[in-house]
Image (cartoon, grey):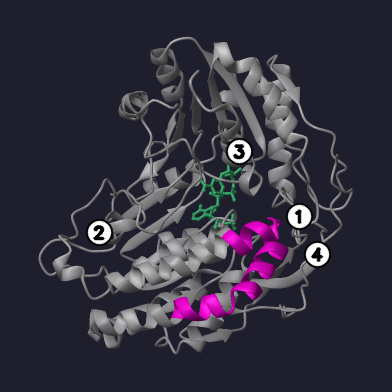
Amino acid sequence: MTFEYAPAPESRSIVSIKPKYGHFINGSFVAGKKHFPTINPATEEILSHIALGGVSDVDKAVMAAQKAYTKTWSKLSGKERGKYLYRIARILQERAREFAVLETLDNGKPIRETRDIDIPLVAAHFFYHAGWADKLDYAGLGHNPKAYGVAGQIIPWNFPLLMLAWKVAPALATGNTVVLKPAETTSLTALLFAEVCQQAELPDGVVNIVTGDGSTGSAIVNHSGIHKIAFTGSTEVGKKIARAIASTDKKATLELGGKGANVVFDDAPVDETVEGIVNGIFFNQGHVCCAGSRLIVQESIAEEIIEKLKVRMAKIRVGDPLDKNTDLGAINSKEQLVKIKELSAIGDAEGAERWSPQCNLSNKGFWFAPTIFTGVTQAHRIAQEEIFGPVLSVLTFRTPQEAMDKANNTPFGLSAGIWSEKGSRIFWASQHLKAGVIWANTFNKFDPASPFGGYKESGWGREGGKHGLAAYLKNGKETGAK
Ligand code: NDP
């Protein structure tokens, strides 16, 4: 028996998008000079026009953040700061549906994910860090830990509001003030968050949001009033930031790219593993730095796993991100779609075998069918480079040591997964995998209490948990950040 799904679109009437937005500086929205359109990637409809911040906008935001730090925020007790964070968390929960719909419209990810994953995790981050604000002195973070002052924060488009929460919540909990730049294609939820700051009566200037492009981000990185940088994005831009701050006393955490290995041993529970592989690479259209984008499967079960994976992939519903039945939404931008297509074409040219289920993709918007490449070798570019889309590269192994060697053979070291029913094998493999985050018999599980970050070209430092707090404190015991 086959089931047909009737369309179940979420109403967008809950969101009200202004035709044009300015920056959020010193507690108010201020007009921008130049603007650029932001579109819904599923339809190419222009949603609004976003201000392109320049050096003077960043300067005003930093001045506001410095003033707020000196006059207000640094004078409040941790308990008082915590109250504001709790208030923000509760408002985010109250307005969760509005945020979920807006994020889906602006980013292209399915409403099922924004509603059930992104926004609940955003609120959880604020609740978690609210709880820490008055306990920093007793948390083993050094004697009398002190904030840096103004933190400059630059975030990507794949989890727009969640990355904001990862950055803003620990910064405020530790007593820093913030100048944040959202990604060019996904500024709308950050601007709605600015309204939440107003609603929570957060003191003016504690959170400032300057929208714009890479040049706006660069102005933040190079501003002399900023003492701490937190960046999530590509390794290429991460390297630029590292070079820009090399001769300064600025501290930085960089959360960069990945090419996560999902290692499947021959004793893995097959059906659960297939579900985990799908979640590892097709969650959020594969726009996930820690995606399980390389499947490294034991040769003896590879055929069975791939066969079942194809059956499961054929059931992935690709389409309207606002439809509650949709599993895979739109690719976030035309540029990203071009990149995914280019790297996939390289996979074909290198001799790997491409397979996708039949999908009816819309002519409007940016779409890419869930795809696997089999017959991939370590030398292939699709086994080494971050595709950042719904594309899985499949490699095989014969011995556990070979699996570890293959898994570690990339310039990255962000995430990995292990599938096996033997605890001893899981412990052995987790000691050999060079990855900041290792999941066993699951994938893509996130929690504010758990530190997240990578080795090698995947970045510096950790975000989340106590490690993430330390990165925002001058004498916090550091964890690999500059
Ligand atoms: P970027 O690294 O360019 O963007 C991340 C953020 O940095 C954005 O806010 C961006 O602004 C800003 N930025 C760009 N240039 C600079 C600069 N010189 N100084 C300071 N900030 C800057 O990622 P892209 O969006 O261009 O994506 C490119 C590739 O990066 C993807 O294909 C993917 O492989 C990878 N990526 C990895 C992510 C991760 O989480 N690891 C997240 C996003 C992308 P703007 O948006 O205006 O360009």
Query: Is residue 457 a member of the stretch shown in magenta?
Result: no
Mark whose residue sits in front, 1 or 2: 1
Frontmost residue, 459 versus 403: 403
Residue assigned mark 4: 9
Q: Are marks 4 and 3 in contact (CB under 8 Å)?
A: no
Ligand 1 has an atom within 8 Å of the beta carbon of the residue at disc 4: no
Q: Which mark is residue 325?
A: 1
Frontmost residue, 243 versus 338: 338
Neighbor class of circle 1 (other Cα within 10 Å; few <14, some 14-19, many 20+) is many
Amino acid on which disc 2 is placed: Ala
In the rendered view of the protein, which quadrant contains the N terminus? top right
What is the magenta range? 88-116
Query: Is residue 111 a member of the stretch shown in magenta?
Result: yes
Q: Which numbered disc flags the more N-terminal residue, 4 or 2?
A: 4
Residue assigned mark 3: 281
Q: Which numbered disc flags the more N-terminal residue, 3 or 1?
A: 3
